[in-house]
Amino acid sequence: MVSWRCFVAYSFLTTVFLSGCGEWAKSAGQNSRQVIKETNVAQLITEANDAQKAENYFTKGNSLFNLHRYEEAIAAYDKAISVKSESAEAWINRGNALTALQRYQEALESYDEAIAIKTDKHEAWFNKGNVLTKLQRYQEAIVSYDKAIAIKPNKLEAWINKGIALSKLQRYQEALASYDKAIAIQPNTHEAYYNKACTYALQNNTKLAVENLQKAIKLFPGKYDKLAKTDLDFAKIRSNNKFKELIQ
């Protein structure tokens, strides 16, 4: 079955607050207020510089990730986090790089750090679900996908991958309902039709398996006919003439 993976690449929102210093009288009280104001301005400037430094490391990490230089990307994200530890985005993309290296337990820890900072990061919940699926921890994966969906109900990737996890648990009707949710969001979602075909094939329902596979092939010619030739999910219907005609 097809399972989506999403790479999250957000940049920091850097806002600099600078206050100008007016003319102040030289009384002791006014001098104290001047010192406080100058300290506040200096603090804001330091924070702005740190935010820019963190953003630079984060951007570098994203560039390295896109070049598949995952170890270096992780090092860059670590630097961003060392400057701005509360960056959920850096923790998420660090997790993505670790996932690419199949360092799944570390990836889960990274996503959990992001979630601890911002519980409403649907990307963190979704990617955590993907890693849990990789680890065949399907029930936990479903919980994570549900969290992502609760935050972003139209996240069709989460509906698709939730369907895959449900299918792995042989909860086929729930899986089909999940794929249908994705199709309701985006009618041309070829991945959902392909996974529906897989689910029907696992239930030995040749008619609906072929029907949905045909839709997937029509939406993405040249991909799913080849994929279905070797996909073990179609083992029960592989000898069926209609199925053979469709994929030949």
Image (cartoon, rainbow, N blue to C red):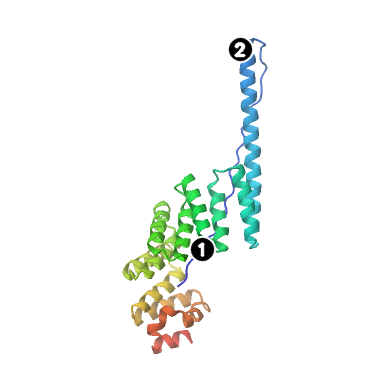
The image quarter in which residue 100 lies: bottom right
Q: Which residue is drawn at 44% across and 88% down?
A: 245
Q: Is residue 39 above or below residue 4?
A: above
* Nearer-the-camera pick, 83 or 174: 83
Q: Mark 2 points at which residue?
A: 29
Rate crowding at label 2 as few (under 14), some (14 to 19) or many (20 or more) other CA atoms within 10 Å: few
Residue 16 at x, y = what percent? 62, 35
Residue 115 at x, y = what percent? 47, 49
Q: Residue at x 35, y 78 (%)?
A: 208
Rate crowding at label 1 as few (under 14), some (14 to 19) or many (20 or more) other CA atoms within 10 Å: some
Marks 1 and 2, Cα distance to the nearest angstrom? 60 Å
* Nearer-the-camera pick, 108 or 90: 108
Q: Mark 1 points at which residue?
A: 5
**Amino acid type for the residue under numbered disc 1:** Arg
User: Left or right: where does residue 117 sit relative to residue 65?
Assistant: left
In the rendered image, the quadrant that contains the N terminus is bottom left
Q: What is the secondary structure assignment of the residue under circle 2?
A: helix
Residue 68 at x, y = what percent? 63, 63
The image quarter in which residue 188 lies: bottom left
Q: Residue at x 61, y 55 (%)?
A: 74
The image quarter in which residue 140 lies: bottom left
Q: Earlier in the sequence, mark 1 or mark 2?
A: 1
Q: Which residue is drawn at 40% across and 89% down?
A: 239
* Nearer-the-camera pick, 54 or 16: 54
Q: In this view, does 84 lie above or below 27?
A: below
Q: What is the secondary structure assignment of the residue under circle 1?
A: loop
Residue 221 at x, y = what percent? 51, 78
